[in-house]
Image (cartoon, rainbow, N blue to C red):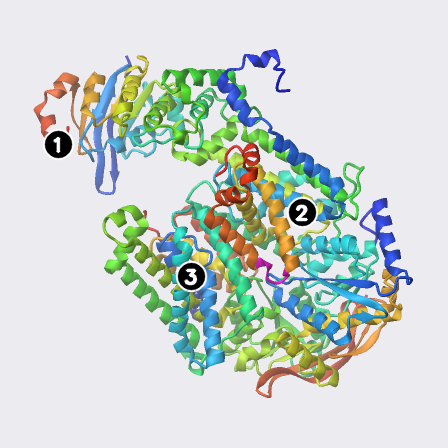
């Protein structure tokens, strides 16, 4: 593959080759996804946890799209996760039991919510945005609580029984189908995200994040781009929520909880933002850490989570990772182009 | 209820195999694992602490061996999040091969796990959550806590017998609150009383002032209150601060408001409050005296009704194992649990074989000072009360 | 011939403070026009008015005969106005190649494409490469901007503005802060700007102004103080007085 | 109706007392300190321990709670926060959330997970009637304390040399240092003061809202709403915002109880939409 260059690409100019190389797949990426799929066979008793990881990873990836690529901070990303989760639950309950159909509709509905909400995050400072996103999530939470005749309120939504995926694959007890399903969806959405961030549109987002003033003076209309990416991120978050509903066959108010938004942020701190893998790697580290810590000390694990977070932020993730993973440094460099 | 899963064949075999293996009497001294899933962190952490302490105390007191089997308790924190509860329950079933699922601090947590109990034919002992319909979500659910309607009728009946004609209700705006509001109204209206106003307070609410002002405007004979146990004290203080106690509005509530965990630190404002509930740490029986003493010593706190649910839940599991001679077959255990009755520290209780819900005495109590500490002192008893919602069906 | 830029009675007040007032300035097509003035004369405000960062309190702005007083920043860029900044306003995490491609793609209307790779649009890439080479950035176009020497970053400022193919280019102190050994590069590049581009140079540095401009306007206390060909302004004693009184180093 | 108005004012004052410390650390120092609630909780627990174990009277506990939280704040400022001033708001959010988690677990470990209550002295309990309007004594006490506090703070900030040094240091640390302002010391003192106020707020509000290890998260939202709605450049802003929110919330809940929790969130969003810098912010 590296030796035989097809004739038409030989004429590619050096700069184009540089840009293409930046967007090209590297071997650790293949490795990452191959191992993720290999785990279907390798770790049959942890499918449920891995399903949760895939969903959290997708959710964090969605936050990465706005935080890592467009620089929009959010403390309320769970709003769209929740919309997707409830949409999927209600669809399943009232007739649309096929999961993929439900997933697509839920994503679209969450996207619509994101589109409307995006107009509120265009102005103001980071602090304003933190509060506005938080406020939107709180209102959604309260709405879901109030509409208890349809959402089940605090008791949760019962009777969510999805049928077989595409009419062929039934959800099973060990969580295998669930994991394969969530991983596949996450993978496909990851591919799309990867394509988008490497496009001119993606590049213009990075420019907006770096220097919004200058981006405006070279003719980029910031608001439209931000609305577009925010809507897309909401679609992703909604699909993550829909996956959770379909694989756990239950929806409760916790899908809209503040801690759900905070978790996604923590995941990105752990995994790093702005290179797409941060959400996925962070989700793995976060869930494993939480699982291990809470098995060790069910009541006080949250202390150690806090401790790790403080250390991570204080020392800086890059320096910490560099210290621990110096032997793996070349590998990490290969996966991530640029990390903040 | 029909099964929500199409069991993959391999999983069914694996699980079935595990059950056969666990159930075979040839292997002496194997362990019986009990998966105890509780909110140990987050807003409902205190529920988890009470149940866990009681369950551990039970094992310490009665020994870790029953019917020749060693009991192993696996405690997991679900942070009060239903999807986590479900995942943990599923993992406990698949990986740890637990014979009984137990715990479940809140209604949605029990709801999320219910299909798994049906699917794996594993008994699920609900030790805390109190919404009436929980036991209907799976034929394998057994409850040792209480239902909110069950304890609400106590206070409603007491009120109508004690001259309350016009009452108002004030509840937290979520599932259990609405249950309580409904039951109270039905019961009081049936006895000839009237509910002249219903106020619902948001779950996140630091100040009761505007709601209490409405009560003050309406001047009912009595105010019936349900708030989750952490909010009882604030409510009580603001009730008194507003002078409602002096203006002739009688405060009545379910026992959640004067939770044993809290009541002593509420101070004098709580004195005289009449509530109805199924357990008070002050319950006068030798069983309870021993239980309270041991619990206080072991956990360094006063046991409340949550602890009681944990204690009786463990007792139910132990007794069922004795009855099956140590067999952990889920259906056999479930059958053994149905109809079982015993004398608990809270008084005589039994498991209704039809509904698998608990039947117990509901006591009407008044907050009084006993040996310098505030307690709910029982003064009237409704005997062997079943969950009224399911009884009506 | 329609002037490239014309302002009529342009003014901006912040409360009682008049940062700009009654500025009527005409810049002819293809001109090399310089705007000078002591610190605090209102040059920055004037640029912000021209580029649409601030809405004017009074007056109008015409670009090639079209009234753009109410047009958005991006709209003015599309109509052929570009600017550089006195203090670098670049994208530190992007390479010069990406930076310039971004502006070119935006101009060509392909900037919002989200399903093709940045490197796949050869029209954009080739133009970017040519421009960067012309601006003496060819060797460094794939380095991250914040690792470039300062002089090269100044050049990128100009290249980025040129990538918008402006008819009118506003240069805001292009040589500010550039070390002596890199200064030549910048001055040469400014001198080599295409003739069909009208340039309005806002500058402090008299050497650069006199070598580059053919016409000079002097701004003092928010108002046009003098205007004329270079030698006329250079010999104007009033201008000297203003400058010597305010800023001795010129 | 007047009673409800007073209740609204008192609730507003309660919000302000909880948020005053944050108005200092976030508002004046521009540090997104989500751990504010943790310092408030520390003050609350200090009061509970002093009162129940050592029998210290309530009023004497208040300054002690202030000092305890201030000391805690000083230690944390010198060791940890000082490294975070120049970081992005997001980093500050994550750092302080980490602290909140640790504080929750630590409080749980030290004090137990159940709720603690404070017994007020009898002269602060009950209710008095002024011109036909029933007023809770403790609420009146809160209103008075808060009013004095806000006034005092504003005077310190606007009139003293320390105040101007602080403003200069927040605007531009480098320039301030160049002017010979001991930036480190100014920040340390201010942060300790803000933490102290948080502690005082915790002690004062514990009576009404209760105190348990979840406190820092449960009420985080309210602190943040008050400060962001009020604008972060002064202390009168948060005070007015707290009053406005308090009155609107209480009135709203009284008149249209169905709206319940929506009122305060909707107000926050509306204000931030129209004035992203906050309602009472002067343009910076």
Q: Is residue B119 left or right of residue D43?
A: right
Q: Are marks 3 and 2 on the same chain?
A: no
Neighbour tally class for label 1: few under 14, some 14-19, many 20 plus, Cα within 10 Å: few
Give the distance between the C-alpha atoms of the residues marked 3 and 2, in whole angstroms.
37 Å
Please state the horizontal and vertical placement of residue B261, each as a whole percent of the image: 61, 75
Q: Residue at x 60, y 28 (%)?
A: A25
Q: How many residues crowd around disc 2 within 10 Å: few (fewer than 14), some, or many (20 or more)?
A: many
Q: Nearer the viewer, residue C31 or D80?
A: D80
* SS at badge 2: helix
Residue bearing mark 2: A52
For residue D227: magenta? no
Secondary element under disc 3, as helix, strand or loop, is helix
Where's residue A120, x and y in %?
A: 48, 43
Give the letter of the chain under mark 2: A
Vertical comparison of B202 with A9: above or below: below
Tell me, for residue D19, which label it has, or none.
3
Name the image quarter holding residue D137.
bottom left
Q: Does the rendering let one see residue A262?
A: yes
Determine the CA span between mark 2 and mark 1.
70 Å
Q: Which residues are magenta?
A: A297-302
Residue A275 circle label? none
User: Please, what is the dominant secondary structure of the magenta stretch?
Assistant: loop
Where does label 1 land, which residue? C248
Picture quadrant of residue D246: bottom left
Q: Secondary structure at mark 1?
A: loop
């Amino acid at each position: 593959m590296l030796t035989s260059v097809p004739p038409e690409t030989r004429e590619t100019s050096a700069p184009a080759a540089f840009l293409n190389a930046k967007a090209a797949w590297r071997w650790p990426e293949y490795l990452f996804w191959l191992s993720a799929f290999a785990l279907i066979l390798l770790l049959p008793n942890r499918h449920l946890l891995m399903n949760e990881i895939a969903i959290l990873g997708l959710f964090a990836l969605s936050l990465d799209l706005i935080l890592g690529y467009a620089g929009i901070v959010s403390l309320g990303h769970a709003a769209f996760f929740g919309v997707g989760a409830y949409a999927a639950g209600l669809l399943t309950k009232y007739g649309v039991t096929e999961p993929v159909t439900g997933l697509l509709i839920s994503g679209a509905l969450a996207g619509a919510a994101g589109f409307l909400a995006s107009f509120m995050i265009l102005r103001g400072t980071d602090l304003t945005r933190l509060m506005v996103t938080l406020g939107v999530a709180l209102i959604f939470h309260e709405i879901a609580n109030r509409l208890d005749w349809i959402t089940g309120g605090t008791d949760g939504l019962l009777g969510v029984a999805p049928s077989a995926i595409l009419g062929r694959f039934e959800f099973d007890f060990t969580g295998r189908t669930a994991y394969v399903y969530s991983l596949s969806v996450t993978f496909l959405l990851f591919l799309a995200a990867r394509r988008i961030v490497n496009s001119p549109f993606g590049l213009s987002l990075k420019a907006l994040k770096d220097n919004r003033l200058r981006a405006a003076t070279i003719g980029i209309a910031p608001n439209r781009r931000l609305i577009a990416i925010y809507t897309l991120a909401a679609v992703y978050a909604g699909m993550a929520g829909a996956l959770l509903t379909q694989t756990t066959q239950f929806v409760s108010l916790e899908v809209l909880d503040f801690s759900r938004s905070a978790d996604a942020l923590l995941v990105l701190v752990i995994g790093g933002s702005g290179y797409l893998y941060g959400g996925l790697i962070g989700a793995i580290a976060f869930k494993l850490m939480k699982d291990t810590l809470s098995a060790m000390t069910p009541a006080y694990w949250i202390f150690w989570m806090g401790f790790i977070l403080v250390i991570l932020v204080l020392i800086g993730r890059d320096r910490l990772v560099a210290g621990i993973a110096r032997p793996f440094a070349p590998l990490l460099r290969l996966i991530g182009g640029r990390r903040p | 209820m029909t099964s929500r899963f199409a069991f993959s064949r391999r999983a069914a075999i694996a699980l079935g195999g595990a059950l056969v293996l666990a159930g075979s009497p040839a292997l002496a001294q194997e362990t019986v694992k009990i998966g105890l899933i509780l909110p140990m962190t987050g807003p409902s952490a205190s529920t988890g602490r009470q149940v866990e302490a009681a369950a551990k105390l039970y094992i310490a007191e009665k020994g870790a061996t029953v019917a020749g089997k060693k009991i192993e308790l696996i405690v997991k924190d679900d942070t009060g999040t239903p999807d986590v509860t479900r995942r943990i329950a599923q993992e406990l079933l698949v990986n740890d091969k637990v014979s009984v699922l137990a715990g479940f601090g809140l209604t949605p947590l029990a709801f999320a796990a219910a299909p798994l109990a049906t699917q794996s034919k594993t008994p699920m002992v609900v030790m805390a959550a109190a919404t009436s319909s929980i036991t209907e979500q799976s034929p394998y659910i057994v409850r040792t806590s209480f239902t909110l309607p069950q304890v609400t009728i106590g206070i409603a009946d007491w009120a109508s017998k004690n001259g309350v004609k016009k009452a108002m209700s004030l509840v937290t705006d979520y599932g259990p609150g609405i249950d309580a509001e409904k039951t109270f109204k039905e019961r009081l209206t049936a006895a000839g009383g009237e509910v002249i106003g219903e106020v619902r307070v948001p779950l996140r609410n630091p100040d009761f002032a505007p709601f209490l002002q409405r009560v003050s405007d309406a001047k009912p004979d009595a105010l019936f209150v349900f708030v989750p146990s952490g909010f009882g004290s604030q409510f009580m203080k603001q009730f008194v601060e507003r002078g409602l106690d002096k203006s002739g509005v009688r405060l009545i509530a379910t026992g959640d408001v004067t939770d044993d965990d809290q009541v002593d630190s509420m101070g004098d404002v709580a004195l005289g409050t009449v509530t109805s509930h199924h357990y008070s740490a002050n319950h006068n029986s030798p069983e309870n005296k021993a239980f309270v003493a041991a619990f206080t010593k072991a956990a360094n706190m006063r046991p409340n009704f949550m602890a009681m649910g944990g204690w009786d839940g463990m007792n139910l599991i132990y007794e069922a194992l004795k009855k099956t001679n140590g067999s952990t077959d889920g259906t056999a255990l479930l059958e053994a649990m149905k109809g079982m009755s015993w004398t608990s520290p809270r008084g005589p209780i039994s498991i209704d074989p039809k509904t698998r819900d608990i039947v117990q005495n509901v006591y009407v109590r008044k907050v009084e000072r006993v040996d310098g500490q505030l307690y709910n002192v029982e003064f009237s008893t409704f005997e062997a009360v079943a969950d009224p919602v399911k009884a009506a069906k | 011939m329609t002037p490239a830029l014309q302002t009529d009675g342009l003014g901006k007040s912040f409360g009682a403070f008049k940062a700009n007032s009654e500025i009527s300035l005409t810049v002819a097509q293809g001109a090399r026009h310089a705007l000078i003035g002591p610190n605090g004369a209102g040059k920055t405000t004037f640029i912000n008015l021209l580029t649409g960062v601030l809405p004017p309190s009074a007056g109008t702005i015409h670009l090639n005969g079209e009234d753009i007083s109410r047009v958005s920043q991006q709209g003015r860029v599309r109509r052929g106005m570009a600017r550089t900044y006195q203090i670098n306003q670049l994208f530190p995490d992007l390479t010069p190649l990406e930076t310039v491609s971004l502006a070119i793609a935006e101009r060509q209307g392909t900037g919002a494409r989200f399903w093709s790779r940045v490197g796949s649009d050869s029209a954009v890439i080739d133009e970017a490469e040519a421009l960067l080479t012309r601006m003496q950035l060819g060797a460094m176009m794939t380095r991250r901007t914040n690792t470039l020497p300062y002089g090269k970053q100044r050049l990128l400022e100009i290249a980025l503005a040129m990538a918008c193919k402006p008819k009118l280019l506003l240069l805001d102190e292009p040589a500010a802060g550039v070390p002596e050994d890199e200064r030549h590069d910048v001055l040469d590049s400014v001198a080599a700007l295409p003739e069909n581009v009208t340039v309005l140079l806002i500058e402090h540095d008299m050497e650069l102004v006199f070598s580059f401009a053919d016409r000079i306007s002097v701004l003092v206390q928010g108002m046009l103080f003098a205007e004329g060909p270079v030698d006329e302004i250079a010999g104007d004693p009033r201008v000297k007085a203003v400058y010597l009184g305010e800023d001795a180093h010129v | 109706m007047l009673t409800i108005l007073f209740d609204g004012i008192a609730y507003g004052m309660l919000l302000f007392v909880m948020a005053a410390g944050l108005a200092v650390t976030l508002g004046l120092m521009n540090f997104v300190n989500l751990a504010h609630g943790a310092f408030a909780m520390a003050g609350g627990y200090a009061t509970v321990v002093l009162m129940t174990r050592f029998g210290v009277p309530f009023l004497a506990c208040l300054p002690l709670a202030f000092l305890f939280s201030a000391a805690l704040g000083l230690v944390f400022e010198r060791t940890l926060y000082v490294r975070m001033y120049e970081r992005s708001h997001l980093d500050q959010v994550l750092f302080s959330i980490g602290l909140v988690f640790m504080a929750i677990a630590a409080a749980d470990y030290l004090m137990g997970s159940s709720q603690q209550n404070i017994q007020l002295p009898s002269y602060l309990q009950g209710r008095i009637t002024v011109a036909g309007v029933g007023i809770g004594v403790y609420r009146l006490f809160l209103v008075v304390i808060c009013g004095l506090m806000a006034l005092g703070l504003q005077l310190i900030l606007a009139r003293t040399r320390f105040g101007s040094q602080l403003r200069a240091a927040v605007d531009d640390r480098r320039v301030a240092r160049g002017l010979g302002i001991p930036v480190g010391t100014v920040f340390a003192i201010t942060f300790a003061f803000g933490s102290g106020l948080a502690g005082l707020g915790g002690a004062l509000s514990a009576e009404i809202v209760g105190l348990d290890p979840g406190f820092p998260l449960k009420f985080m939202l309210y602190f943040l709403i008050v400060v962001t709605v009020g604008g972060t450049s002064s202390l009168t802003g948060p005070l007015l915002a707290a009053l406005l929110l308090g009155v609107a919330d209480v009135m709203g809940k009284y008149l249209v109880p169905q709206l319940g929790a929506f009122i305060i969130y909707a107000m926050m969003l509306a204000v931030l939409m129209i004035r992203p810098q906050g309602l009472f912010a002067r343009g910076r």
